[in-house]
Image: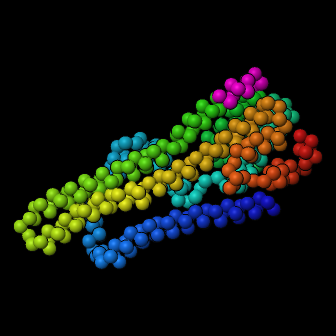
Amino acid sequence: MVAGFRTQADAQQDGAFALNFIIGLVVSMGCVVGGFVASGGHMGVIWQPYEMIIILGAALGTFIVANPLPTIKDTGKGIFEALKGASPKGRDYLDLLGLLYTLMRELRGNARNEVEGHIDNPKESELFKKYPKVLADKEMTSFICDYCRLILIGNARTHEIESLMDEEIQTITRDKLKPYHALTAVADGLPALGIVAAVLGITKAMGALDQSPEVLGELIGAALVGTFAGILMSYGIAGPLAHSVKVSREKRCRLYVIIKQSLLAFMNGAVPLIALEHGRKTISAYNRPSIDEVENETMGGGGDAPAQKAA
């Protein structure tokens, strides 16, 4: 019942994010263009497709030059995730906490060879198959299995595991934020590229000094549109889009902190449900599932509920 409610709420959040993006873009562009027209400006002056080709083409070219192919592909993926609002929601947190709880119970109560079967081959594990969204994230699944394996060995010290986790989380976060840095570089360069388009337009206008003032004024006005377009695309589109990618990716990286805190608490002797509380507290209050929701997810189902409650 709770899971269904959370899933419906998550879908509503996705729709709200997309709607906010559209509304924000319409308000921004509408006020700029509307204010220009209301002040007596003519839309024909702003519409300069060749200026846009110069600016956007140069921006795309420098983006390709500055970034390796994996980053270029990941940037496209990051933009899609940001526009879709594909950051973790309540259901994602419950799935992760449910998987961690089950794994910790296995580590606590079952023989080593039984647990190794799950973490060595998670794709074939019935335990992992119960949480397909977690299993679909190969990096996160590998992260969970690697540290469960270290716990299973039994010789690792908690502070050493914590240091190793911190280092890996920093590496993962740095990799996940490469699209943000790439888009930020493009946003920072767009005003300068707008000036390049404006200079080319002025150069064209200089070749028409023998024309009438009306023709010359139109050419100079068209040239200045390049500066306007570069600044608007930088601060009105590319910059906010880069920030959205950053927010989406940082929320995704927070899942690793949940895993870290839960497993470290378990290594320090906490029972699985208490260890989960250490992870749950790291979730933002906007998306944090309640204690009751976590208990329903971990202890409310299955035929071995008494055994779970005993754990």
Apparent side of residue 2 relative to residue 225 in the rendered image (left or right): right
Dominant secondary structure (helix, strand or loop) of the stretch shown in magenta: helix
Numbered label tally: 0
**Front-most of residues 64 and 235:** 235
Q: Quadrant of the N terminus?
A: bottom right
Q: Which residues are magenta?
A: 153-163
Vertical arrangement, residue 225 with respect to residue 296, above or below: below
Residue 32 locus on image (x, y percent): 38, 69
**Front-most of residues 180 and 40:** 40
Residue at the outermost front position = 39
Residue 175 locus on image (x, y percent): 52, 40
In the image, is residue 301 part of the stretch drawn in magenta?
A: no
Q: Quadrant of the C terminus?
A: top right
In the image, is residue 158 part of the stretch drawn in magenta?
A: yes
- From this viewpoint, is residue 206 visible? yes
Which residue occupies 48% across, 47% down? Answer: 180
Residue 22 locus on image (x, y percent): 50, 67
